[in-house]
Amino acid sequence: MARMSIQYHELAGNSVPWDSYYHLGMALEGLQKKAEALASYQKALEAGGDTVPASDKEQIDAAVKRMSL
C-alpha cells in the first residue's frame, strides 16, 4: 500500500509525503529487506526535512542505525 501511494504521488508529479517512505521502510524491514528499508528511511528524512516531528525523526534515525548494522 505504501509503495502504491508513493507511485501515485510520483506519477501525479507531486512530492511524496515523508511518512509514505517511512511506512514503506517499516514494511520492508519487516520483510527483512534491509537495504531497501534503509533507502526508504533515508528518503523519509530527505522528503520530510524539518517537517518531520522530533519523535518520528528519532524513530527513523534509530531504524537507519538498525539497518546500517
Image: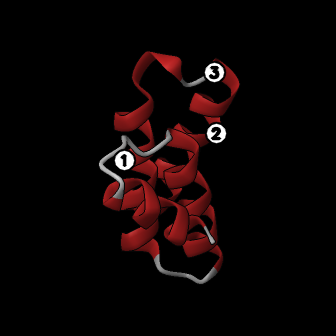
Marking on residue 53: 3
- Left or right for 50, reference 46: right
Tell me the crowding category of disc 3: few under 14, some 14 to 19, or many 20 or more residues within 10 angstroms, Cα based. few
Residue at the front extreme, as displayed? 12
Q: Earlier in the sequence, mark 1 or mark 2?
A: 1
Taking the spot 33% from the left edge, 61% from the top edge, the residue there is 11
Marking on residue 59: 2
Locate the C terminus and report the quarter of the image it occupies: bottom left
- Structural distance between the alpha carbons of marks 1 and 2: 14 Å
As drawn, 40 above or below 3: above
The amino acid marked with disc number 2 is Gln
The amino acid marked with disc number 1 is Lys
Helix, strand or loop at mark 2: helix
As drawn, 44 above or below 5: above
Q: Which residue is mark 1?
A: 43
Taking the spot 45% from the left edge, 43% from the top edge, the residue there is 44
Residue at the right extreme, as displayed? 55
As drawn, 59 above or below 5: above
The amino acid marked with disc number 3 is Pro
Helix, strand or loop at mark 1: helix
As drawn, 33 above or below 25: below
Query: Measured from the top left, where is residue 68 in percent x and y?
Result: 39, 58
Query: Measured from the top left, where is residue 34 in percent x and y?
Result: 45, 73
Query: Measured from the top left, where is residue 25 in percent x and y?
Result: 53, 61
Taking the spot 39% from the left edge, 71% from the top edge, the residue there is 36
Query: Measured from the top left, where is residue 13 in percent x and y?
Result: 30, 48
